[in-house]
Amino acid sequence: MNHHAQSKPGHASGGHAGHLPSSGWGMAISAWLTGVYFIIEMAIGLWTGSIAVISDAFHTFSAAGTYSLHTCAPATMQMGTQC
């Protein structure tokens, strides 16, 4: 039996969609905060000369890019709208 098929009182479904921001301000804030963290992490990596920290900064950069794309995706789905 699928545990997601049963719904609990007060819940629309048994999924996890409500746990993370999916669009709008929450996703935009996540993108900005992750971008700021990338800049700080990259600066520390360059200052200390740590290749591991620089590598992790680029991993963080890819996450910031993903958040940014996810924020812009709904706008680009409409005809004539650019992000």
Image (cartoon, rainbow, N blue to C red):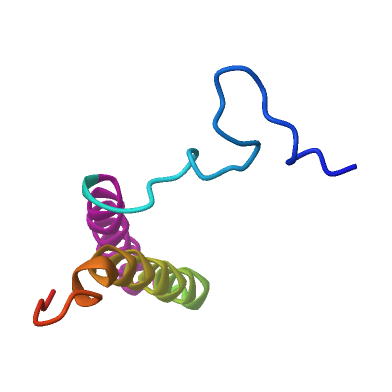
- Residue 78: x and y in percent read 19, 74
Quarter of the view holding residue 43: bottom left
Which residue is rendered at x = 68% and y = 29% of the image?
7
Of all residues, the one furthest to the right in this rendering is: 1
> Viewed as shown, does residue 34 lie left or right of 53?
left
Residue 42 shown in magenta: yes
Tell me which corner region of the image, top left, top right, bottom left or bottom right, holds residue 70: bottom left
Whether 44 is drawn above or below 25: the answer is: below
For the image, the number of numbered tags is 0
Asked whether 54 or 11 is in front, the reply is: 11
Q: Position of residue 79 (x, y in %)?
A: 15, 80
In the picture as drawn, the residue positioned furthest to the top comes out as 9
Residue 82 coordinates in the image, percent (x, y): 11, 78
Which residue shows up at 45% across the image and 44% down it?
Answer: 20
Residue 35 drawn above or below residue 59: above
Q: Which residues lie in the magenta part?
A: 26-49
**Between residues 7 and 32, which one lies in front from this camera angle?**
7
> What secondary structure predominates along the stretch shown in magenta?
helix
Q: Quadrant of the C terminus?
A: bottom left
Q: Nearer the viewer, residue 3 or 28?
A: 3
The verdict on residue 71 being magenta is no
Who's the residue at 38% across and 70% down the image?
A: 66
- Pick whichever, 68 or 33, lies toward us: 68
Quarter of the image for the N terminus: give it. Answer: top right
At horizontal 28% and vertical 45% (from top left) the residue drawn is 26
Q: Does 56 sit left or right of 5 as displayed?
A: left
Q: Quadrant of residue 62?
A: bottom left
